[in-house]
Amino acid sequence: MSQTYTYATQEQVQSALDLMSISDYQMLCDRARLYITGTIYSEEMDLVHEALDRVLNGNRRWPIEVPFTTFLIQCMKSIVSAERNSLLNRHIKTENHFGSLGYDALSILSPKTPSTEEIILQQERLRQLIDIKNQFLAEFFDDPQAQMIINSWGTGLTPLEITSKMGCLRNEYRAASARVDRKVQAHRRKRPGL
């Protein structure tokens, strides 16, 4: 059974807005702070004002049965959801570019979507890690088992899956893993933080 709503008039919206307290605005800002990460809104009040603007100009209609602040929170969530969908659509168009850098397309759907600066830092960090991985592969050019372990980094494969894929015994895997671990530890001593 579908529920029908009675929508507020512009006068009722203005009256509800006039009756809002400072704590109501603070609560809206607190909620907006949770929602704005990874959107075009740089401050929580930007999102609150966007929601209020849409309600006041009639683009969003307030069902009078719903508390006004609850409606505004849902309005803000809808706005950022539309913004994220827009970002996702732009992301899908450039997925080949980001995919080649290891950017996860699904991470844009998370509640904490990374900002442009965070994406750039992630990409730079990924490039550094790829360079390090390539250095290790070059150091183990004559050790296919060690290379298989290095190539499995970031794949989520378990040691059992790696040994199965390598076609080697567990002892051989452990020995190759120990060789790689020694190189990694030596590298970390030379370049802490990576």
Image (spheres, rainbow, N blue to C red):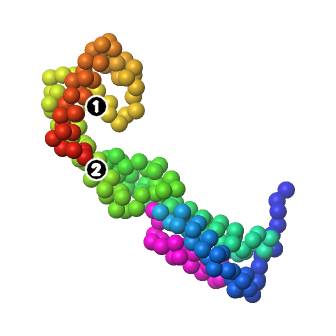
Q: Is residue 4 above or below residue 58?
A: above
Counting from the top left corner in percent of width and height, residue 11 is at: 75, 87
Q: Is residue 52 above or below residue 65?
A: below
Counting from the top left corner in percent of width and height, residue 21 is at: 67, 80
Neighbour tally class for label 1: few under 14, some 14-19, many 20 plus, Cα within 10 Å: some
Q: Find numbered disc 1 in the image and state the secondary structure of the residue it sits on.
A: helix
Neighbour tally class for label 2: few under 14, some 14-19, many 20 plus, Cα within 10 Å: few
Is tag 2's residue or tag 1's residue first in the polypeptide sequence?
2
Q: Are marks 2 and 1 in contact (CB under 8 Å)?
A: no
Which one is in front, 46 or 104?
Answer: 46
Rounded to the nearest angstrom, the CA distance separating label 2 from label 1 is 18 Å
Counting from the top left corner in percent of width and height, residue 157 is at: 39, 28
What residue lies at 52% left-to-right and 72% top-to-bottom? 44
What residue lies at 51% left-to-right and 53% top-to-bottom? 110
Q: Is residue 115 left or right of residue 152?
A: right
Label at residue 125: 2
Counting from the top left corner in percent of width and height, residue 163 is at: 34, 18
Is 181 included in the stretch rendered in magenta? Answer: no
Q: Tell me which corner region of the image, top left, top right, bottom left or bottom right, holds residue 192.
A: top left
In the rendered structure, which segment of residues is drawn in magenta?
38-59
Q: Is residue 97 visible?
A: no
Q: State which quarter of the image contains the N terminus.
A: bottom right
Mark 2 vs mark 1, foreground winner is: 2
What residue lies at 15% left-to-right and 27% top-to-bottom? 141
**Label 1 is placed on what type of residue?**
Asn
Q: State which quarter of the image contains the C terminus.
A: top left
What residue lies at 15% left-to-right and 32% top-to-bottom? 138
Total of numbered circles in the picture?
2
**Residue at numbered disc 1:** 151
Q: Is residue 85 left or right of residue 9?
A: left
Q: Find numbered disc 2 in the image and state the secondary structure of the residue it sits on.
A: helix
